[in-house]
Image (tube, rainbow, N blue to C red):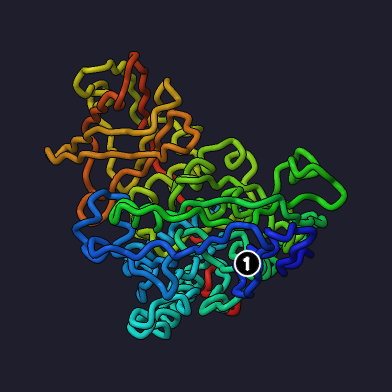
């Protein structure tokens, strides 16, 4: 196993002086060389304390930035210093439905719920923010949320031993919301121990993986970029080690897997699980199992999950274990996500006889077009609580679906589903019909779809309405403890 101790080998005299200076050790440069004095940059301006100054939807995730005890350590008061976690009763109900649906397909779900930057690095807070941040409350509520997830049937690694860290290299970047490779590695150790407790893990082929350092990454952090927009300043790039993992004895690092068969463990999640931080590689190292990593930057909570569920890899060969990584930033009560995930878990209307089907050609500049109507041939019962929609565009690059559904009562619903710009799309959207509160008993009448944004050529769209999948909750669903 690699070591995390820093070593300087073969440095020039000047480079050694710079390296020693960075550690706080005084070193005199050789005579005749120029001397420089580095000053910290930058102090936050008053605008950073004004929530109204965070004008864009992206910037609102950073309300409000505060400076740490070192000028380049920045924290978000709303997200990094939160003390409340979890979701609403409706969110927990949806999470349970999702878990039961995966279970019905033989898939165990592992939730990797990240501790916040404030919990992990409270020693980097300014004295005032350190005093006001209720760390004990945050940890209690964080652990209570993990227990709630366990009670729904998820496998949940407890990452609270990583909180209040003073270890170096740092778990999180100074000016960015992502963990460093070292944070990913320390998390993977704990996650791997939970994964190895899952029944059936012992049947997954075991191999030996090794992780190697591949160089350094430079990052202009998200916190730093937002602070720069607010205060018209520029922070220096932050640098961190990068790693790759490979099968022992197989050089090159280009292929993590030794054969073409699909791994039996899949990782979905946010950009934290992307290749930059080698989280999947560390998981392979500590579990001894191949990991199929389908996470990608810009995925958010749902992007990589939904893309994976719509893939042939999942539909034809679902994994035994699915590891789902996300942070407390995301809204776990987001109804649109569950409507899509529950539809795609069963491949929506594929293999099902549609109750209604329709096609249309959408053209640039035209108004929305009716593509499906109940009663054109014969009237069918199509209540929301029992049905789903499967929509396919002939152009696989379409990433936004907008339209209107009318019901027999005269009520209507405007809908919009977006896919991340970074996702590889297939032009398909599928979702359960809306069934919360008084929506479930409504009977479908007609659907209109808008031409996709930026459309330059006509595009065909096909819509099917069919019965939704019946995911039976396992009879042995019990609360987990000690995972």
Count of residue discs: 1
Q: Is residue 391 depicted above or below 9 in this figure?
A: above
Identify the image quadrant of residue 399. top left
| SS assignment at label 1 | helix
Which residue in the protein does label 1 denote?
191
Q: Can you give x and y, in whole percent of width and height, for residue 282 in the image?
A: 68, 59
Q: Residues within 10 Å of mark 1 (few under 14, many from 20)?
A: many
Quarter holding the C terminus is bottom right
Q: Nearer the viewer, residue 179 or 432?
A: 179
Quarter holding the N terminus is bottom right
37 to the left or right of 200: left
The residue located at (64%, 70%) in the rendering is 190
3 to the left or right of 426: right
Q: Can you give x and y, in whole percent of width and height, for residue 434 in the image?
A: 28, 47
Using the rendered image of the protein, determine whether residue 105 is visible from the camera's viewpoint.
no
Using the rendered image of the protein, determine whether residue 51 is visible from the camera's viewpoint.
yes
Q: In the image as oriented, which residue stretches furthest toward the right?
A: 249
Q: Can you give x and y, in whole percent of width and height, for residue 85 in the image?
A: 38, 71
Q: Is residue 322 depicted above or below 457 in this figure?
A: below
Identify the image quadrant of residue 445. top left
The residue located at (59%, 65%) in the rendering is 183
């Amino acid at each position: 196993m690699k070591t995390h101790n820093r070593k300087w080998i073969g440095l020039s005299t000047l480079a050694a002086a710079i390296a020693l200076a960075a550690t706080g050790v005084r070193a005199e440069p050789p005579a005749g060389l120029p001397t420089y004095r580095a000053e910290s940059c930058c102090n936050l301006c008053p605008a950073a304390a004004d929530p109204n100054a965070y004008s864009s939807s992206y910037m609102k995730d950073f309300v409000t930035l505060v400076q740490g005890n070192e000028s380049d350590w920045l924290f978000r008061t709303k997200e990094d210093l939160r003390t409340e976690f979890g979701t609403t009763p409706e969110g927990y109900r949806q999470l349970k439905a999702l878990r039961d649906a995966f279970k019905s397909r033989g898939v165990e779900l592992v939730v990797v719920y990240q501790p916040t930057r404030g919990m992990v690095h409270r020693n980097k807070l300014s004295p005032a923010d350190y005093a006001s941040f209720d760390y004990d409350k945050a940890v209690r509520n964080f652990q209570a949320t993990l227990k709630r997830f366990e009670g729904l049937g998820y496998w949940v690694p407890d990452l609270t031993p990583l909180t209040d860290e003073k270890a170096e290299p740092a778990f999180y970047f100074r000016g960015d919301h992502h963990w460093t490779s070292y944070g990913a590695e320390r998390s993977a150790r704990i996650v791997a121990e939970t994964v190895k407790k899952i029944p059936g893990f012992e049947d997954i082929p075991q191999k030996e993986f090794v992780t190697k350092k591949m160089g350094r990454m430079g990052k202009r952090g998200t916190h730093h970029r937002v602070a720069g927009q607010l205060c018209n300043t520029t922070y220096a790039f932050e640098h961190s080690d990068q790693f790759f993992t490979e099968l022992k004895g197989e050089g090159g690092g280009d292929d993590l897997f030794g054969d073409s068969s699909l791994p039996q463990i899949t990782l979905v999640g946010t950009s934290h699980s992307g290749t930059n931080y080698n989280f999947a590689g560390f998981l392979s190292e500590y579990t001894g199992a191949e990991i199929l990593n389908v996470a990608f930057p810009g995925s958010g909570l749902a992007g990589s999950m939904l893309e994976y569920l719509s893939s042939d890899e999942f539909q034809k060969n679902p994994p035994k274990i699915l590891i789902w990584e996300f942070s407390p930033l995301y809204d776990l009560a987001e109804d649109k996500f569950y409507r899509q995930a529950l539809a795609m878990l069963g491949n929506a209307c594929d293999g099902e006889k549609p109750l209604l089907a329709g096609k249309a050609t959408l053209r640039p500049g035209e108004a929305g077009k009716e593509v499906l109507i109940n009663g054109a041939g014969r009237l069918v019962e199509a209540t929301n609580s029992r049905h789903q929609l499967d929509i396919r565009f002939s152009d696989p690059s379409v990433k936004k679906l907008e339209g209107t559904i009318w019901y027999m009562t005269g009520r209507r619903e405007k809908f919009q589903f977006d896919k991340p710009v970074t996702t590889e799309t297939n032009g398909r959207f599928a979702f359960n019909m809306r069934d919360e509160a008084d929506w479930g008993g409504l009977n479908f009448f007609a659907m209109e779809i808008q031409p996709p944004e930026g459309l330059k050529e006509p595009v065909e769209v096909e819509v099917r309405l069919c019965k939704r999948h019946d995911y039976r909750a396992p009879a042995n669903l019990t609360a987990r403890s000690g995972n």
